[in-house]
Amino acid sequence: MSATSHALAPWLLRQLRQLLGQRGHAVLLAGPSGLGQYELALALARAWLCERPTADGACGQCASCHAIDVRTHADLCALMPETLCMTLGWPIDESDQREIDDKKRKPSRFIRVEAARQAVAFTQTTSARGGLKVVMVYPADRLNIEAANTLLKTLEEPSPGVRFVLATEAVHQLLPTIRSRCQTVQLGWPDPVEGREWLQDHGGLSESAAMAWWQASGGRPDMALALAGSGLTPQQWLGLPHALARGDWTSLADQTPSAQLDVLQKLCHDLMAHAAGATTRFFPAEHLPAPPPWRVLALWSRELTLAARSVEHPFQAGLLQEAWAARAREALGTARR
């Protein structure tokens, strides 16, 4: 059994096996956030470059696999936003790194056209190991128009031995010209029982905790794992709706603005579902306060959607959180008026 089979969740391993049996030089992995697009893209790149691949992917033992582990493989280009490269340990071009280190600019949250040009140049050189060369693009929706257009010709007609794997959590944001040049593979939702068992094993959680975080994530494995490590307990999560209705922000105070906004959007979604008589997704219905009027929920939902557009670079984050807390209390309080 390969090392990949140990690293990947079972549903991703099944998809990897299918991908390894397909032909084509460009694959686009698509699906909602939290399903494992990055993990599957990296596993596919590892398998393509492995010296001793198996039906389950890369062997995990050869020099190629070790080079990827330490982010030094000469035949793998990770085309990502600089912020994500720094988070995941992928190298940034030396001149770009100097600019960031010298405080001349901040690391980009998008894939820059300069990085796309470097990726194109990478595909035009000879393989260092005598095998394939792979460009991994994640998240592909972070390609701006210039960067995407830079890749088009190479994506359509790459040099022999060059393969692309793109992954995205927002396929609708990709240019149609990018999508048309790739074989799109939609990631499937994992079986809830299998997902909770994986969460118990992978996250070291009890059965009840795994069940709570699985529901809190809406059935998205990566998100469930992140929630389990967020510092919140399942009990705190279940108590959030009523706490926010009281104006109690304590459980969320140490979370990032992005995580706080995610909670508010999930709560608003479930209150709308509950008000419509539908099944809730993130919180058990019995842990929700009485739903506010629909017009209040609809307005709050629109406000949260607008806030999500700028949440990664909030101005005066502390004041913003105070405003969110006050707005949540106001919206939830209308049910009692």
Image (cartoon, rainbow, N blue to C red):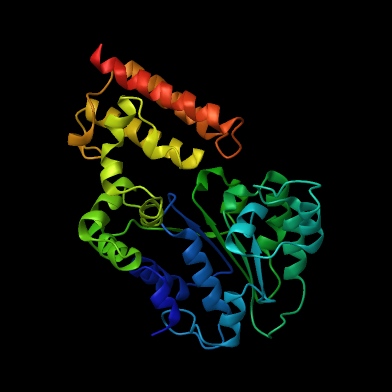
Q: Is residue 134 above or below residue 67?
A: above
Q: Nearer the viewer, residue 192 or 199?
A: 199
Question: As drawn, is 219 to the left or to the right of 160?
Answer: left
Screen quadrant of the C terminus: top left
Q: Classify 93 as above or below 19.
A: above
Using the image as rendered, state which of residue 245 and residue 185 is in the foreground. 245
Position of residue 287 relative to residue 149, above or below, is: above
**Residue 141 at x, y = what percent?**
58, 48
Residue 95 position, x and y percent, is: 82, 59
Whether residue 327 sits left or right of residue 195 in the image: it is right
**Going by the image, does 81 lie left or right of 304?**
right
Quadrant for residue 208, please give it: bottom left
Query: On the rendered image, what quadrant is the N terminus found in?
Result: bottom left
Q: Is residue 282 visible?
A: no
Left or right relative to 234: residue 83: right
For this orientation, the residue located farthest to the front is: 250
Q: Position of residue 171 (x, y in %)?
A: 51, 48
Q: Residue 222: percent from the left, percent from the top?
A: 40, 56
Q: Residue at x 72, y 63 (%)?
A: 119
Q: Is residue 307 visible?
A: yes
Count of numbered circles in the view: 0
The residue lying at 54 percent from left, 75 percent from top is: 46
* Residue in the foreground of this view, choosing between 174 and 32: 32
